[in-house]
Image (tube, rainbow, N blue to C red):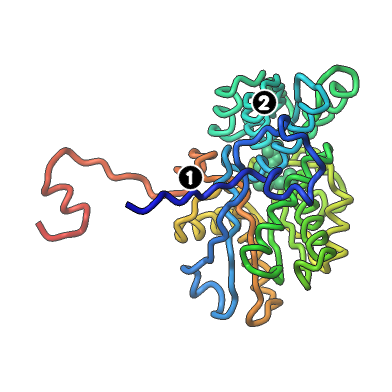
Amino acid sequence: MKAAKPIIWNGIIREFQEFLPKVKDDNVVTLREGNTPLIEAVNMEGIFESGLKIFLKYEGLNPTGSFKDRGMTMAVSKAKEDGSHAIICASTGNTSAAAAAYAARGGLRAYVLIPEGKIALGKLSQAMMHGATVIQIQGNFDDALAIVKEVSKTYPVTLVNSINPYRIEGQKTAAFEICNQLGFAPTYHFLPVGNAGNITAYWKGYKEFKEKGIIKTLPKMMGFEAEGAAPIVMGRPVKNPETVASAIRIGNPSSWEAAVKARDESGGAIDMVSDDEIIYAYKLLAREGVFCEPASAASLAGVIKIHKKGIFKNGDMIVCTLTGHGLKDPDTAIKSSEKPVTVPPDLEKVVKVLGFKP
Ligand code: F0G
């Protein structure tokens, strides 16, 4: 018998330690996040001309189902190292799920503030199941963020929203992985923008790899807000943001300036896509066999929008970050799909529905 071949991935803190703030090994709180696949889109003929290569960085395959795990392992490990016993965040859902899971793992308390009735079911169930104290705010994400910032100033709890610099440090590792997976940096990097931490993190990651000589070129950073929640595009905060992509229903992003810097330094763009465009892209991705949540599809919706403007050149290499798993938001998936057919337990009736001749 052949010996079993171990395939071991130690999580982003241990795998990328030379690029990250130091953490004592005993304090590392990890669920072995990272190492997510980069999947080439193969079923998009007819939408894009051949020659355009689109790769999907499927961050929904992180331990809690979103890219937030990369930042959370770093932030919670550092909180632990600093002797903190509790963490707090505001969230549209994914940050709270990751905070709850990593706090549980590390033996810290988690307090999460979420907009009442506006987070997807899967995310709510995660925060509850991992034992976080869940507080529903009768307001939006921006209201919740203002409160947690105040709480963390006065009380002994560590803020783990992306204003916490360790979050950005952890999240930049997705850019490292993409460069390692492709062997170079893409021409364009598309991603959804909500609180604007992730676009900031990716840009930092790409620049660090370039400074080290690991890559020769940098991508253009292409961030996409939802039309009803597009403060950066509008150039002013949005008081009552609204979108089907509840993860990015944010009217006053924390990393606004850093995102604009990433856009300008990279020669990229921050633009917006409508809910219809998001759902269209969400379904196209499902046709690839890749199930992401609606907000994630804003990246591909952005590619379609830019493609229509005729900006891409043959051979351009495009990466879209799919930030969260589709199972996070089963309600939107069911609403966006064909309904199941119900029949009695009868062979003939089933065969008829299948479209075969009985
Ligand atoms: N996609 C998903 C699935 C998200 O959950 C988020 C943010 C984003 C994109 C946008 O990333 O904020 O770095 O620009 N979710 C945060 C949360 C706000 O609370 O889970 P960003």
* Marker disc for residue 124: none
Measure how far apart labels 1 and 2 are at the Cα level: 33 Å
- Secondary element under disc 2, as helix, strand or loop, is helix
Residue 205 relative to residue 99: left or right: right
Q: Amino acid at mark 2?
A: Gly
Rendering quarter of residue 145:
top right
- Secondary element under disc 1, as helix, strand or loop, is helix
Quarter of the picture holding the C terminus: bottom left
* Marker disc for residue 106: 2
When the figure is inspected, residue 348 is found, relative to residue 145, above or below; the finding is: below
**Residue beneath disc 1:** 333
N-term-proximal mark, 1 vs 2:
2
Residue at x 80% of width, y 68% of height: 213
Mark 2 nearby-residue class (10 Å; few <14, some 14–19, many ≥20): some
Residue 77: x %, y % from top left: 74, 32
Residue at x 71% of width, y 43% of height: 13
Rendering quarter of residue 190:
bottom right
Residue 110 relative to residue 266: left or right: left
Residue 287: x %, y % from top left: 45, 60
Residue at x 70% of width, y 22% of height: 110
